Each structure stands twice: as C-alpha cells, then as structure tokens.
Image (spheres, rainbow, N blue to C red):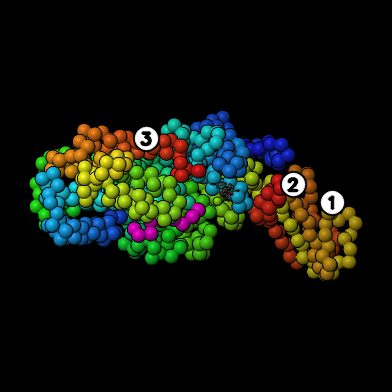
Amino acid sequence: MNWIGVAALYKFELARTWRTLFQSIASPVLSTALYFVVFGSAIGSRMPPIDGVPYGAFIVPGLILLAVLTESVSNASFGIYLPRFTGTIYEILSAPVSAIEVLLGYVGAAATKSVLLGLIIFATARIFVSFELVHPWWSLAFLVLISVTFALFGFLLGLWADGFEKLQIVPLMVISPLTFLGGTFYSINMLPTPWRKIALFNPIVYLVDGFRWAFYDIASVGPAISLSLTLAMLLICVGLVIYVFKTGYRLRT
Amino acid sequence: MEAVSNHEGGPRILNSLSSRRLPEENPSLDKVLSISNLTKTYDNGYRALKGVDLAIERGEIFALLGPNGAGKTTLIGIVCGLVRPSGGEVLVDGCDIATDYRAARKKIGLVPQELSANMFESVWGTVTFSRGLFGKRADPAFVERILRDLSLWDKKESNIRQLSGGMKRRVLIAKALAHEPEILFLDEPTAGVDVELRREMWEMVRRLRDKGVTIILTTHYIEEAEDMADRIGVIDKGEIILVEEKHALMRRLGKTRVTVGLSRKLDAIPPGLFARPLDLAEDGLSLAFTQKGEDDSGAGAEPGLADLLKQLAARGIDFRSVNADRSSLEDIFIDLVGKSR
Ligand SMILES: Nc1ncnc2c1ncn2[C@@H]1O[C@H](COP(=O)(O)OP(=O)(O)O)[C@@H](O)[C@H]1O
Ligand SMILES: [Mg+2]
C-alpha cells in the first residue's frame, strides 16, 4: 500500500474544505439552525410528542442526515469531478496509487468531513433543544456508515457527471427531496397506508429510522432492517466503484 | 538503434548504426524503456498507434518528432498510465506497466502537454503533494532545491492561478520532478513558452541528463531536437518511421550545399571542371553543388570541395569565398514525413 500517497490525497481533499469553509460547513450548519428555530422551537412547541419524543428533539436525527447526505454527495462528487474537469487527474492516473488508495483518499476525506459536519450539527442542535442519546455508539456507527456510503455514491456521481449541472442536480433534486420525504419531520407510521407502503421504497427512510432509533430507541421499521439496508447500500456502492475502476470508466481513455 | 517499420506501402528506413553507449552484444542491459508492438485503438475506432517498437537508453535525451496527430501524446499516455493500451508491452526499467505498475510509475515523471494545475493551491503545496502522491517521504530541502532550480522559489507561496503561463509550466516541471524520477517525459514542453524560459528549460534538461535522468521529449520545434537530443525518433500516423542517433541521421539524410564565390564573372562552366552536377549562378559570380551529409567526398568516391578548388586554381579562376550550408533536421523531417504521406 502507498500510504503516503493516500495521506497526500486525503490531506489535499481536506485542505479543500478549509478553502471552501463557508460552503461546506457554515452554510449547512446555518440552514440546519434555521430548521431548528422554525420547526423545532416555533412550530414544534405546538406539536404533540411523537412516540414520546418531543417534536423538536424528534427531528434532530433527520436534520443531521439531511445535511450529511447532501454534503457527502456534493463533497465527494466535486472532489473527483474537479480534477477531471481541470485535467489535473493526469497526475493521479500516472501515480503509483491503486484504485483502492484513490478511493481511500477521496472518499475518506469526504466522509471525514461529513462526520465532522454531523457532529457540529449535533452540537448546534443541543443549543436549541434538549435530548439524550440512548445508543451513542450506534448513532456514531450509523453516522460513519452513512457518510461513507454517500461519499462513495458521490464519487460515482463525480465520475459519471459530464458537467457541473449534474453534480448539483443530484443532491438538490434527488437526495434532499428523498430525505424530506424519508421521515425527517414525521414518523412514517403517521402516514396513511398507501403512502406508508410507497415510503418504504425510499431507501432514506431506513437510514433516518435507524439513526433515530440510535438516538431515542424508537423505530418504525426496526434497527436490524435499517442496519442491513444501510450495509447493502454500502456494498452496492463499493461494487459499482470496483467495476468502474476495473473498466477504467471515464478515467482512462 | 534498429528500427522500425515494415508495414505495407510505408517507408522502410532501416539502419544499422549501433549506439554510442551500448555494446551491441548486450542489447537489453541498458534500456530504460522498452516498448514492443504497442497498439492503441480509441473507442471511436481510431487507430492511434499501429505497432510501435521503441527502446530508450538510460541517460539519453530522446526527441520524438512527428506532425500533429501522429500519436506522440498517446504513446506517452500509455507509458505513464493515462491511456490503456490495446496491445503490446511496455517495460520501464524492466517493470511491466500493467503488472508492476507501481514500480514502473515511480520511475517516471510526466510534464503533460496541457497546462493543468490545481489553481487554488500554492506552488509549495502542489509540489509537496506530488511527492507524497508518488509515495515519497516529505523532503522540504529537496523540494526547495527543485523550486530554486526552476526559479520558482520567490513564488513558493503564490497561488498557481496568479502565475503566468510560463511559470505554470515550471510548476508542472517541478511537480514531475518532485518524486525524483529516473525518466522524465516532456510533452511539447516549449509550446507557447517564451525564449527565456525555453533556454532555462534546456539548461535544466541538460543538468538532469548529467545526473543520469533519461529525458524523452516531443516537440514541434525541430531546431530544439537538433540542439538537444542525442537520438531522434520520427513518428507519423501511429508508426515509428525512424530512430537514429542525431549526428548519424544528419550525416546520412542531410545534405550540404557548397557555394564558391568567384572574383570575376564566369560565362559558362568550363567543360570537365568538376565530375558532378555544378550550378552557375545567374550573375555568373558563384558556383554551387550539393553533397550528401556533411561531406561525402574522399575515399576515392565523389570529388569534393577540395577537388573543385584545385581545378579552379589550375584554370586560373579566382575565388573569394567558400560557403557550406548544412540542411537542417527540419528539412530532413519534412522530407521523411512527406514521403510517407
Ligand atoms: N480520446 C481519444 N479518442 C479518439 N481519438 C483520439 C483520442 N485522443 C487522441 N485521439 C486521436 O489520436 C491521434 C493521435 O493523437 P495524439 O497522440 O494526441 O497525437 P500527437 O500528440 O502526436 O499530436 C489523433 O488523430 C487524435 O485525434
Ligand atoms: Mg500531443
């Protein structure tokens, strides 16, 4: 393994965050804070608790995921798309680094950022609402797993995209609507039956449900199913990435 | 070295010159790069390389010449890992680029044709990154030396986007040298570069060569190859049509035009003056002939300048100047590539 090479890529990618600090940390934290003010405090104070959890606290896991999912995808996709776009990818392709090492560098950095972002939002949430974590280690595990999975997905997106538009469209038009509909602001048990069935096709439902279970020990589909589906998504992304590297797709002509 | 092509209808320029450095009986010992039967067909069906064989000797400066679209960048791309070959084998100092890519790539530094650099990074940062990416431990003293050699030291904290085109090119060279490669590829290094930088670049290339680095460059500027290279390869339409030591090439394919200026006007060339075609200028004030190479006379073959001058003296024709114009590599190149069209 070329660990020095991995470290170089990882550091480079993290350094990019500092250059774009506002975009990658400040802006998601700000928008999440706004959600807490509007939904958590203003509206939430008039809502009954859900499954015994006050509404303001109930939405915390979903809001963390909303930011983590979109940022994982944007960060990882930009990270690999940018060198493709500017041509600097030549250096990575000519370096003695394997596909796995490139992945560790890019996806590792994007996932690290997302985990940090999740923790920052968590801390921010504590300012607005009070809550206790029931399964702290599980919540950390879910956070890491989900960050890695969506960073991998972002990496694939960055390879596939042939313009900046596509990079922005996917987090904006796919990830965030699915997260909104995935039970961030409500429990899917509250949905009427047909909609509840349809909601179960949304993979993000399971992520939010599992993450919320780790927070409050309440669940609609159950932690085992959530965890299995999260792992399945991770494996699918890993499989796709391996396939992409084997074929040299969009990297080597 | 031997070469090169024997495809149907194409030129067949073979030569038997052995290298200056390499004993003939040990042909694989000091090849730092061996390419055999390399082919590349792009996804759109275009055959960019049609069976290239090429061997580069350790420590030489090799110039790869060829018109636009000949396949130079493709060839370099395959060796460096940017382009997947369709067939053939490439060994970098004995390491196969497919099966032993790590060892092979560590030995290679590439300065690409296009100016592409991480615009938002500092010069120092990007060169340090390159070294790390290639698996070398950080060595600030070494990076400093590279930056000083390339007159980049003052700019080490500058953002790359603030640099001029020439400076960016230097940064790319610094990046390529950051991991101490044994082979340096320079793809059209002087395209769009000012005279000053070009001179500095060639100085650097010579210094590197003195340290034992092998340099392979492609260029449009044939004078550059003429000045710099030890050996020259010509590629056209995906085929190497010639590989030869530069001086031998000039000797073999070059021509020299010898002109003798006369003191008094001559109306006609006296019969029997010179046993090869001789031209009298319109004003009658000079005689000229063309010989192959730098001088093909002697050994009883063709009469040369000395014979002509003796004859002129014997006939009482006074001359006041002698001028020899060697054809440039460019003429040779145009000749070669023209023929294969
Ligand atoms: N990705 C590609 N897809 C299809 N054809 C290509 C591609 N890259 C280069 N070519 C073609 O291959 C030929 C050789 O290109 P190149 O190696 O860049 O030549 P050179 O560097 O000698 O100018 C050209 O005709 C070019 O159009
Ligand atoms: Mg080229």
Name the side, left or right, on which B52 lies relative to A220: right
Which image quarter: residue A240? top left
Kind of element beneath mark 2: loop
Q: Do labels 2 and 3 share a chain?
A: no
Residue at image mark 3: A239
Residue at image mark 1: B275
- Amino acid carrying label 2: it is Gly
Q: Which one is nearer the viewer's eye here, B99 or B201?
A: B99
Name the side, left or right, on which A124 lies relative to A197: left
Give residue B92's position: percent from left, percent from top: 47, 37
Give residue A122's position: percent from left, percent from top: 16, 51
Residue B253 image label: none
Using a 10 Å C-alpha cutoff, classify the residue at mark 2 as few (fewer than 14 neighbours), some (14 to 19) or many (20 or more): few
Chain ID for label 2? B
| Discs 2, 3 touching: Cβ within 8 Å | no
Determine the residue positioned at 13% across, 40% down.
A217
Determine the residue positioned at 49% across, 35% down.
B91
Callout in the foreground (2, 3): 3
**Over which residues does the magenta segment extend?**
B113-121
| Discs 1, 2 touching: Cβ within 8 Å | no
| Discs 1, 3 touching: Cβ within 8 Å | no
N-terminal label among 1 and 2: 1
Name the side, left or right, on which B63 lies relative to B274: left
Residue at image mark 2: B298
